[in-house]
Every structure is written in C-alpha cells, then in structure tokens.
Image: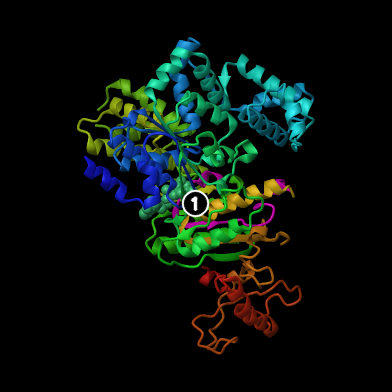
Amino acid sequence: STKSINRLLDGLDPEQRAAASAPRGPVCVLAGAGTGKTRTITHRIAHLVRSGHVSAGQVLAVTFTTRAAGEMRTRLRGLGVDAAQALTFHAAARRQLRYFWPRVVGDRPWDLLENKLRYVGQAANRAKLGTEVEVLRDLASEIEWAKASLISPDDYPAVTARAQRDIPAPAAQIAEVYRTYEELKNAAQVLDFDDLLLHTTAVLEEHGTVAEEFRDRYRCFVVDEYQDVTPLQQRLLDAWLGGRDDLTVVGDANQTIYSFGGASPRPLLEFTRRYPDATVVRLERDYRSTPEVVALANRVIGAARGRPAGSRLKLIGQRPPGPEPRFAEFDDEAVEAEAVARRVRELLDGGVSASEIAILYRVNAQSEAYESALTEAGIPYLVRGGERFFNRTEVRQAMSALRAASGDGSSDLVTTVRSVLARVGLTESPPAGGAAKERWDALLAIVELAEELAATVEDADLPRFCAELDQRAAAQHPPTVEGVTLASLHAAKGLEWDAVFLVGLAEGTMPILHAGDDEAAIEEERRLFYVGVTRAREHLWLSWALARTPGARRNRRRSRFLYGLVPEDHPAARVARSQQQKPSTPAKTRCRVCGGPLLETIEVKLGRCGRCPSTVDEALLERLKSWRADRARELKVPAFVVFTDATLM
Ligand code: ATP
Ligand code: MG
C-alpha cells in the first residue's frame, strides 16, 4: 500500500528520503556522525521491500562490528523487515562458506583458528625472530594488514618498501613468518578471520554455478560504515555483486578508524567515479546529539589535518539544548574511575537507564579500573556489551550442557535450565565482581531467555529452548544484559547512548603511545576521538588522570586533542585524592571572585604549584576571573567549572 510506504518515509527528512526512496541501483550517502545514515539505509531496505522491488530475504546488509550489526538488526526488526540479513562482513562470509564448502571442497568446513599467536610464534621461531607476546602481536597484525590489503607473502617486501611502511622487523623476515604461518594453518586445517573472506571470494570467483546460485539468492547489497572498507572486503563485495550495481553505501570519511588494518575511505569518496549514475546524498543535520555536543564534535574534527575532499562536512545540531560537555582532571586513574562511578550513580538515580550509559576508552586494558569502581558502587555493567555473547566460554559450555540434557526428556523448562546451568557455574547469588560477575551475568541471561520462552510459548521444553538458542547464535542475536556499557572506542562505532564518558584522555593513551609522531597515525587517533564524542546524545564527560596508579608521579599530560577545547593555561578542574578524603570545610558565604552569594563551597587545588599545593591564592583567583571573561567568550567554551567530587559535572 502506497500509504504505508509513505508513512515509512515520514520519519525521514527530505535528503534522507531521497536516498531511501531512490530506485534500485547505486546509492551513496556521505555524511557526518549522527545524521541518520544507518536510519536511512534501514528505511531504504524497508522501502525496497514494501514497494515490491526485492523480498527481504534477498537483501544483505553488512557492517564492521558485531554490535553495529546487532543495532542494524534491531532497527530492521522495528521496521518489520526481520528477514533482511544484517551481518558483519566476517559473519556473512562465514555463513556463506559453511553453505558452499561441502559442495566445493567436500567434507565439513574447517574450524576457526582460536589462537593465532601460537602459529605466529612457531613461524617467528623458524624465522629466528623474537617470540615475546608483543613481538608476536605486532607480527600478527602485520599479517592481518597484508591479508586485508590483498598482499601476498611474495609481494610483501616490495609493497612495504614502496609504501615506506613502518614495519616491526625486516620485511623479508616478516614475509617468511607470513608464509610459514599460512602453511601451518593450512596443515592444521583451520581458518583465520581473513581466510573467511578470502575463501568466500575465491569460491564466488572460481565456481560459476555457486556464484550464480548466490547471485540469484541475494540481489540487493547495503554497506554501512563504508569508510572502513579494506581491499579484501571490497573484493568480496564485488564478488557478491558480480557486475550488478544494486549497492547502497553510507559512510563518513571522518570516522575512518581502521586504516592501520588496511581500511581506506577511498572507495566511499570515489563511489561516483565508479558509478557515474549513482544517487548521491549528503546529510548535515545531526539528530543524535545536543547542539553542545555537536559544537564540540565540529571543533574536534575541524582541527584535523589532511582531510580528503568530500569529508569536510559540518554538523548542524537539531536537538534542543542540553548540558555542556564537562572536562575533569584527576590525580590518578583510580580517582577518575571512582568519580565516574559516582556520576553514573547520579545519572541512574536521575532516571537514566543503565543501558543508556557508556564508558569508552582507547584500549581494553583501561576497563579494569572502571570495572572495579562500578563493582564497588554496585552498578551493573557489561564489557563490550554483549559482543560475541555466543562465543563466550561459559555460554558455549552452557549450551552444550543444555543440549546434552535435552535428551533426558525432562519436563517445564526454567527449573531444568537453572539446574543444568548450576553445573557450569551459575551460583544462587552473584559473585562480587570482575570477570566472574560477567560470566554469571551471561549465564543468568540464558535463564532469563528461558523464562521469556516459557512465558510466551506453550509447552516450551528443553529441545525447543536449545533450538531457540541455536537460532539466536546463528543470527548473532544475544539476549540483552542490562548494564552500563564498557567499550573501546573502536567497538563503539555506529552506536549511541544518552550519557557517554570518554575517559583516560591523557597523552600516551589518547593518542596512543605507538602513534608516535606519525601524522597519519595521530590523525587516525583524532578521528577515533571524534567517533567517541559523537556517541553522546546528551551528557558528555571527558576526563583524564595525571598518574596511572595512586602515589605514582603525576607526569602525564592531558591529550593534545583537548587543546583549544580546554585551554592549556587554564587552572584545570582537578580533583586530588588527598582533598577528596578530607571532610568538607564550613561554607563561606560570599564568592571571593565577585562577591555573589555562594551556593556551595568547593575545595580546590588550583594549578600545579609545588610549594603551596593546598592554598587557593588570590592571584590565581584573579587569573581565573579574567580567564573566564576573556577566554570563555573568545573560545566559546563552556564557562569552566572548578570541580570537587561533590560538584563534578
Ligand atoms: P554514525 O555516523 O554515528 O553511524 P548515523 O549517521 O548512522 O551515525 P543514525 O544512527 O542513523 O546516524 O542516527 C542518529 C540518531 O538520530 C538515531 O537515534 C536516529 O534514530 C536519529 N535520527 C536520524 N534521522 C532522524 C530524523 N529524520 N528524525 C528523527 N530522528 C532521526
Ligand atoms: Mg551509523
């Protein structure tokens, strides 16, 4: 019905609608964060299906992270097109390979390689290279880069020399490790992640009948986050298309964050060169974030260097005003994490739900301080939010235990599931925290799923439940676990939360130390920071610590990306551990800067004076006063608040 089709498009602005309702054929949406790219493509899929151009099953939508794929599936379900597949490149390839393998190779598909470093280690040993974990990691990521860039071991030395690539060992030795690694892996009949894409591409390129069958099955392709496509993924995409042009791509070159892994925004930016008839749409209205967050995002990316043409898009905020983003500096990571946990508690008490809060960091190792602070505060959290739920050890154990038990013909369902899961570690009450608590939460989520099934399906039994679990595992549709999300910035791409904490914004972490002074690497870090800022709908907190552990030398500097956002000469907002622990002093009644009534007494340690660390001196206050007047206006930054823990944010 035309009416329902039009109603579908009602939720889009005119530019989005143009992209969503464009006829079949190539479509490209180039736009900044939060402008509705993902929304546009999900609506486009629904529109193509409802207007009868394709059936939902003929659509294949791909993106780059499991969470982003999950988000897309949720949105497609909301639009009534569940049958459209939304997967990561790897998941799509894995599924296709599993299907084609018996016919093409015979037998069942090879298993996925669980521990890549083992083979890299053996190969490095043969090449007489070091086998320390760091060395192996560097070698492994170099091999990944080469495979994603479609560079063979033979070509590796020449290509890296030509590109003047900064590599972790002599090129000839890396090539040897790469070659041996491939041999070992093939001998063991296992596949790494890149092999999934390589083999699927090869099957489609070399087996005409298989390719024909595939192309009959899938007719319409959609790629979200296209700015992060690698040559290998592009090759697979081309194999899928097989010369057809029913392809919709959306992306934002400013959010390219995987170029270290071989990704490039070039296919996005040069889309029209390849498809001169493509419908091209640019979006600039930002529907996600408050104007305050949008202004900050524009400043962050405005400072970027060497932006390719076509990426200089400015975001225009559409939402009503909200709170100013807040900046805070701490003595060490533990106080930073405690303060974040306290602020999270306030948000929860204020009615923000836990699943609408995220704490984002540069490297996964940073999660530890936050896990313990949240545990201490009794706040539920999930690390990387359900990503790869079905790959978790305890979930796999639980599923095989349930499968084993389902032959027993046991009855009602929830009690059985509980007792089976008790055997794989589900205790009555949750363990104190950390990884054990996470495992417990994952098991509990399975019980809750059983409860859900029991409540909705009559006579739901264990075999039925196992089938449901298998189906969810195949569709990568994990049960929801309520909690604050802890995630790396890379994993946060494409997602959004009401409140976002960007933590650990100190030099060495953001940008990461190994970016060194390589401009391209620093710019990629800046884009990563931009991705972080643009995840927030409303509350945005940016913080950093001057030392890693309590009592360590406070020799860290705030991130260079904060220059211009937080003026360097400002006596930064600081919370010192020593002061937090002191009882608050009696309230003064008048503000010492302007004489106005004091609402609150704030104990601060201003500046970094070595002699009088706890004295607020008049000269400093004068500086603060004139800074506020001059700089705040000039830089259009939020009037800077001097925090104690009580007034943080
Ligand atoms: P990113 O680059 O971060 O992936 P995006 O461009 O894909 O961002 P979406 O996630 O699609 O942006 O949209 C951001 C938010 O704005 C979502 O909550 C979406 O529902 C909302 N939104 C997008 N377009 C509109 C619109 N026309 N009207 C109302 N809300 C919208
Ligand atoms: Mg998106």
Give how far across and how far down residue 3 sits, in percent. 22, 45
Label 1 CA crowd tier, 10 Å (few <14, some 14–19, many 20+): many
Figure disc tally: 1
**Magenta-highlighted residues:** 489-516
Residue positioned 46% across, 28% down in the render: 92
Give how far across and how far down residue 289 sits, in percent. 45, 58
Residue 342 in view: no
Residue at the farthest top position: 106
Q: Quadrant of residue 632?
A: bottom right
Residue 190 in view: yes
**421 shown above or below 326:** above
Residue positioned 68% across, 50% down in the render: 522
Q: What residue is shown with label 1?
A: 33
Relative side of 162 to 501, left or right: right
Residue at the farthest left position: 458
Relative side of 271 to 355, left or right: right
Let me know if residue 506 is in the magenta part. Answer: yes
Mark 1 CB in 8 Å range of ligand 1?
yes
